[in-house]
Amino acid sequence: MRFVDEFRDPDLAEMLGARITTLCEPGRHYKIMEVCGGHTHTIYRYGVQDYLPEDIELVHGPGCPVCVIPMGRVDDAIAIAERADVILTCFGDMMRVPGGNGSFVDATARGADIRMVYSPLDALRIARQNPDREVVFYAIGFETTAPSTALTVMRAKAAGIRNFSVFCNHVTIIPAIKAILDSPDLRLDAFIGPGHVSTVIGCRPYEFIARDHGKPLVCAGFEPLDLLQSVFMIMTQFAEGRSEVENQYGRVVRWDGNLTALKVLADVFALRPYFEWRGLGSISHSALRMSDRYGDFDAELRFKVPGMRVADPKACQCGAVLKGVLKPWECKVFGTACTPEMPIGTCMVSSEGACAAYYNFGQYAKQRVHLEV
Amino acid sequence: MNTGDPAVFSEAPVSCELTDGCITCGDVAVVLTVVEASGPDARCRDDAGRTEDVATELVGAVAPGNRLLVHAGVAIERVEG
């Protein structure tokens, strides 16, 4: 048996689904938001919703790192990449994210040197190999990814590499959850917490959600049974009248997180006073910049950045999808003008985006195809 | 063992694929097993036998057999159980 097989057992899934059903209060509708895009991907890929009673609705949250990047930040990076002395590096999903002046793929076609990397450490390697070029890493991601950027910058500083810098778009999950809790157009009952973000930040930062808002949160792993067990734990809390933070993903999530990683983050980064999130607007203290100590590695200080602000296309309803107000298929351009091949909105670009996940796997859910091992 | 730039991934077990999304930016992490530890990096292997050099500063000293949760070439936690 592979390590993951026990987390994809259809019989166990059926059994868990039945137990969850017994915990539902008759006539009550439960809305549970999975914050992380990785969870959204699992839900559609394995048809997790099919194992739940109709009274439990899974609502997709803003936790797809690519999906929340505003178009202006794409244009700013392209302005840097169009310099002849610059090599811009980024993760794969960023390549097709549309900005106001096209995507990184379009900029590459116009002559910019933009390269896809798997790790920021790969970007640092490119800097070592090209000492006469400026290598910029376009950093995106939540607290899962920010430590890898921080570690790379620390290595660059220690090695005295001067032609490497970071265009920092790292965001933090707690302010986004607060913005959702304050949103007047969304009523949620509970949260499935982001497992890998929680590996870094731990469970403690979520305690205000249970304490102040009375909503359970369970940090969850990314296999189908992880998610079903998390829903079971949430429903058990409802049945017992509790509202707490619990940890289903004990395999890797510690209550206080990874203290070494948190220390590295605090050293290399500083909080921005505000940052624009696609669909959620400007959220205070929700994103990271390079700290003064590492200011020499800040691409926004090294290069002239236009600071573009670009409105989303009118047809795009990514904002409502990111807040869980609209289901992907309720967007008026879903699957017609907006597809994974020709995305209008970011939610259709990344495979963790709710729209792309539903486009790729959702039709199977409608046919009630069950878990595949 | 990779004897060159410690940041080089000789055979990454995962990659950015435009056709199937990018697991790095999707906050997806993979469980790898340490094969050999050397300085700040460790040669690790996935269940399919593919190997990768992983930065280990964030999880402390590692030894062969340890299982690590790896994201974007960096170990972010040890795996228990």
Image (cartoon, coloured by chain):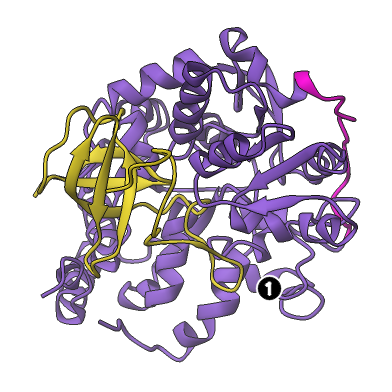
Chain colours: A purple, B yellow
Residues packed near mark 1 inside 10 Å, few (<14), some (14 to 19) or many (20 plus)? many
Q: Residue at x 50, y 35 (%)?
A: A173
Q: Residue at x 51, y 52 (%)?
A: A118
Identify the image quadrant of residue A129: top right
Q: Secondary structure at mark 1?
A: loop
Q: Residue furthest bottom?
A: A367
**What kind of secondary structure does the magenta stretch mostly adopt?**
loop
Question: Is residue A297 rendered to the left or right of residue A125?
Answer: right
Q: Any magenta on residue A41?
A: no
Residue A230 on image: x %, y %: 26, 54
Is residue A272 positioned above or below A340 on the image?
above
Question: Is residue A174 rendered to the left or right of residue B55?
Answer: right
Q: Nearer the viewer, residue A358 or A98?
A: A98
Q: Residue at x 50, y 54 (%)?
A: B26
Q: Quadrant of the C terminus of chain A?
A: bottom left
What is the span of residues highlighted in magenta in the rendered image? Answer: A301-314
Residue A368 on image: x %, y %: 40, 88
Q: Nearer the viewer, residue B43 or A95?
A: B43
Residue type at mark 1: give it.
Pro
Is residue A105 positioned above or below A234 on the image?
below
Q: Chain of mark 1?
A: A
